[in-house]
Image (cartoon, rainbow, N blue to C red):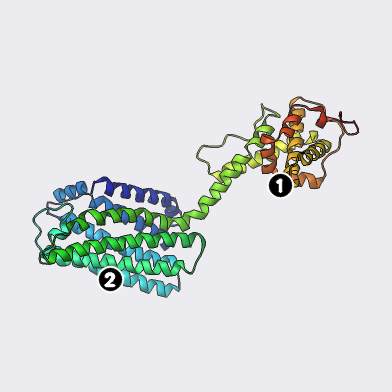
Amino acid sequence: MDSSNYYLPAAALLVGLTVKLPGLVRGWRDPLIRSVCLVITLGAVGFLFAAPPTITAVNETSGIANFSSLLVYSIISAFSASCLLLIVHWRGGPPEYMQRISRRWQTGYSLVIVTLIVLFVLGDAPVERHTDFDTYYATTPFIGEMIVLYLLAHMTAALVTTVLCWRWALQVTGWLRAGLSILVVGWLLNLTFSGLKLAAVAARWTGQDWAALSTTLAPLLSAMAAPCATVGFLLPLMGPALISHWRAVRIYRRLGPLWRELGSASPRTALAGPIPWYSSPHVRLTRREAGIQDGLSRVRPWFDDGIRARAQTAAEAAGHSVAEATNIGYAALIAAAVRAAHQNTPCVPHSLPSHADVKALRGALAGASLALRTSPIVEAVRAGSPAFLLEDGEKSPT
């Protein structure tokens, strides 16, 4: 495989880690957050050290032929254990149970890593292999056992994690179920990765050459599993927040016409101070809503309920639904008030909206904002059409 097939998944996992770092800083005492970050970190490090250029650099730095293979096997074993620990902490349960299960997995995979080191020291692997270490040394004493132990440990973690995630996914809904389903796919890919490598090793024992399974197909499946693992772990944790941010962005944009309309009433006085570029969507929305409320307060002396009523009646006559006509009426009320305020028109007694109408206006800001941008009736009010701006008691021209 090309080196990019290792470095790109590593980069993707590091992006996922970057997303979780703020949460780790705020809640580093939370074992779940630590476990998620550990899984993503070990996954990224595993791909990084499995890339052929990195293998060469590690072997040259250590001065030990194929030392990088031992390092990668140990990292992947630690990654397998961290995934099992993450599932334990994620699913939760009695603290005593979680601690007991966690200690078992930690002890088991610690012994695996120690055994890998011992077998590597006892074995002899003098010829440096960048991509086919598994099949090249499959029949070498101690080294072959090290390879099989690493693959079985990885397969065990993949199988257990797949089963646990699948069973759990059947019991939950929403973002958690979506994340677990993606994890099932990712761990099935990991399970297939180990299975193909083990098949290639077994074929080597019988004198056959299935190295392509280990050197080409298996790494490709592993590269596909990496984004699945990242998305699967992060989706239940980040999904609700992303949806919340997206809704805030949508509302912020929908209020844009109303914000600009009210701002034109007094161009020299901004509705709100500058919003820093790094502000979150929720902060931006809060500032915009507060500015709109201030803008409505500024133009309220020019509110004329007669204009609202005439615009709403015209909208209903044009075939709009009651809700749409109501929004158009409120938009016309605002547009007329902004026009009057901008022209410094003296406030004169007129039919003021009732308290209930003003409250409804504040609740229909998004709909009124859309009407300000799209309604021909509101545009006519903005242009000063006599059909809508007549004083109460005057007769509209036919």
Q: For mark 2, does the 10 Å Cα neighbourhood hold few (<14), some (14 to 19), or many (20 or more) residues?
A: few
Q: Residue at x 26, y 50 (%)?
A: 48
Relative to the observer, which residue lies in front, 74 or 50? 50
Q: Which residue is mark 2?
A: 108
The numbered mark, 2 or 1, whose residue comes first in the sequence reads 2
Q: For mark 1, does the 10 Å Cα neighbourhood hold few (<14), some (14 to 19), or many (20 or more) residues?
A: few
**Residue 274 appears left or right of 70:** right
Can residue 193 be seen from the camera position used here?
Answer: yes
Q: Residue at x 14, y 48 (%)?
A: 60
Q: Which mark is residue 373?
A: none
The quadrant where residue 371 appears: top right
**Residue 205 appears left or right of 193:** left
**Residue 278 appears left or right of 192:** right
Quarter of the image that includes the C terminus: top right
Q: Which residue is mark 1?
A: 363
Whole-percent x, y for residue 43 in the image: 31, 55
Relative to the observer, which residue lies in front, 103 or 317? 317
**Residue 46 appears left or right of 297:** left
Whole-percent x, y for residue 181 in the image: 43, 62
